[in-house]
Amino acid sequence: VTCVLPAGARLTGVKVEALAWTELAGTFNICPAQEPRPISTKTPVVWREPDPAAYSASTWPAALHREATPGNAGGFALAAVTVAPLRWSPASGRLELCTRLRVTFSCEPGAAYRTHTPTQGAAIESSLRGLVANPADIERFAPARAATDLPEVNCLVVTADRLAAEFADYCAWRTARGIRTEGIGERYSAMLN
């Protein structure tokens, strides 16, 4: 589960609560995961035996989640936690699915990462909508924005006028991904010599 945090926030902890469990019908004898190997490998398969600690536990995995990790995507503060929505009882073969849970991230204020232009912010927000579990908070938690796109250029391609057309698609591609890129030519010919 990945969530966007307030701009500049520093992750301090996570709490994951199971709100509802459903037992899946049947009895499950789950074998341990085996080492991955290419199909073309000619060596014999070596069977990995069950881990006694896991197979003697009352339920596995013992925890619903792993520790949360902080992240950053284009200046947006993120937090991610790996959730294990299934729990298995090796002795009985029962398998349960967590159908509802609540994830609460704790954070404290920190320094904002950077300022975006409106075009950069819109591109980054668009890419985050499918990534985070709380897309409604993206705009509210966005880093500061510049008033206009015009004065800032993140990448400048310096080339001769005769080659400018060759770089037009590259400049458009980078700009569409939030990195405003412009090409300049002969008007800055002193730079080319």
Image (spheres, helix red, strand yellow):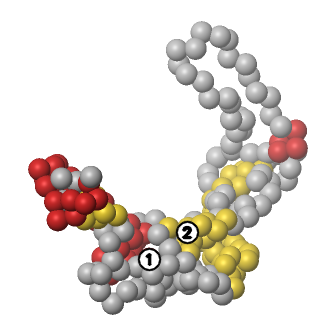
**Location of residue 142 in the rendering, given as x and y in whole percent from the top left corner:** 46, 83
**Location of residue 131 in the rendering, given as x and y in whole percent from the top left corner:** 46, 65
User: For this view, does 121 lie left or right of residue 58?
Assistant: left
How many numbered tags mark residues here?
2
Nearer to us: label 1 or label 2: 2
Q: Earlier in the sequence, mark 1 or mark 2?
A: 2
User: For this view, does 155 lie left or right of residue 82?
Assistant: left
Q: Are marks 1 and 2 in contact (CB under 8 Å)?
A: no
Residue located 28% across and 59% down the image: 191
- Crowd around label 2: few <14 · some 14–19 · many ≥20 (10 Å): few
**Location of residue 86 in the rendering, given as x and y in whole percent from the top left corner:** 66, 56
Q: Residue 59 or 174: which is nearer the viewer? A: 174
- Crowd around label 1: few <14 · some 14–19 · many ≥20 (10 Å): some
Amino acid at the residue labelled 2: Asn
Q: Residue 139 or 158: which is nearer the viewer? A: 158
Q: Residue 127 or 153: which is nearer the viewer? A: 153
The residue that label 2 is drawn on is 72
Mark 1 secondary-structure assignment: helix
The residue that label 1 is drawn on is 135
Rounded to the nearest angstrom, the CA distance separating label 1 from label 2 is 15 Å
Mark 2 secondary-structure assignment: strand
Report whether residue 178 is seen: no
User: For this view, does 101 lie left or right of residue 128?
Assistant: right
Asked if residue 131 is positioned above or below residue 32 in the image, the reply reads below
Residue located 33% across and 90% down the image: 147
Report whether residue 159 is seen: yes
Query: To which quarter of the image does residue 83 belong?
Result: bottom right
**Location of residue 114 in the rendering, given as x and y in whole percent from the top left corner:** 50, 78
Residue located 26% across and 81% down the image: 150
Asked if residue 45 is positioned above or below residue 81 in the image, the reply reads above
The disc label shown at residue 192, or none: none
Amino acid at the residue labelled 1: Pro
